[in-house]
Amino acid sequence: MRTDRLDRITDGGVIAILRGVARDDAVAVADAVVDAGVTALEVTADTPNAMSSIEAIADRVDDAVVGAGTVLDAETARAAQLAGAEFLVTPTVNRDVIRMANRYGTPVAVGAYTPTEAIEAYEAGADAVKVFPAKTGGPEHVAAIGGPLPQVPLVPTGGVGADNAGEYVRAGAVAVGVGSSIVDGEAIADGDFDAIRSNARAVVEAVAAARE
């Protein structure tokens, strides 16, 4: 099951990040991005009622996996697992979160920025490394980490959108994490979920084109 979840993330290549999305809008956002071909959704744990949103999306969506992001401690990790999170994402190397993920067979992408942090996370049991913040170093930084560490799956996040997602894939990323470039707050406020669907489709297509 753990491998299946990882495969769904990497096969699609896009994780849509829902940060600050109200519980009442979360399912509609999930429907829109999944309809556009996204196979992984991340609800950040610092979002109000995040666990309720994870549970609602997990109950609703069959064609994608839903996970929890910005997981800072083992307690939050466990709460997310119990709410139905199928993967976990951290912004930093946190061994307590990694242990909790491993204990219950939940894939975890661990935040790191340097090669030292990346290998530390991987050796501690991370399934993938979230290169964060990606925009600071860009695709070249991802390629530089992947050069000596080809065994570590890299998922750049932070400043990734349709205009540069393909560059990150060509630099060696197995997937990209995308927040506001897909889940636009103004579109949600306007109830314009077609715009969110269009945003998501543009990123999915950019990743697919880069893989050809």
Image (spheres, rainbow, N blue to C red):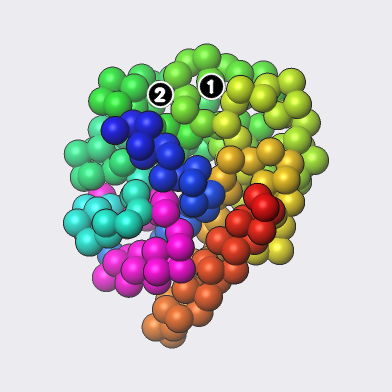
Q: Residue 98 carries which label?
A: 2
Q: Quick one: SS at disc 2?
A: helix
Which residue is at a point 43% across and 39% down the rendered structure image?
A: 7
- Taking depth in this image into account, of 130 and 6 the one nearest to the observer is 6
Residue type pointed to by label 1: Ala
Q: Is residue 154 left or right of residue 4?
A: right
Residue type pointed to by label 2: Ile
Which residue is at a point 50% across and 79% down the rendered structure image?
A: 195
Task: Write down the quadrant of residue 191 in the picture.
Answer: bottom left
Does the magenta-highlighted stretch encompass residue 203? no
Residue 174, given in percent of the width and then of the height, sits at: 58, 40
The residue stretch that appears in magenta? 24-52
Does the magenta-highlighted stretch encompass residue 40? yes
Residue 83, given in percent of the width and then of the height, sits at: 21, 45
Residue 105, given in percent of the width and then of the height, sits at: 30, 26
Residue 81, given in percent of the width and then of the height, sits at: 25, 37
Q: Quick one: SS at disc 1?
A: helix
| Residue denoted by label 1 | 121
Instruction: Tell me which numbered mark, 2 or 1, is placed earlier along the sequence.
Output: 2
Task: Write down the quadrant of residue 145 in the picture.
Answer: top right
Q: How far apart are marks 2 and 1 (CA)?
A: 8 Å
Q: Residue 208 carries which label?
A: none
Residues marked 2 and 1 touching at CB (< 8 Å): yes
Residue 162 drawn above or below residue 152: below
Which residue is at a point 45% across and 81% down the rendered structure image?
A: 194
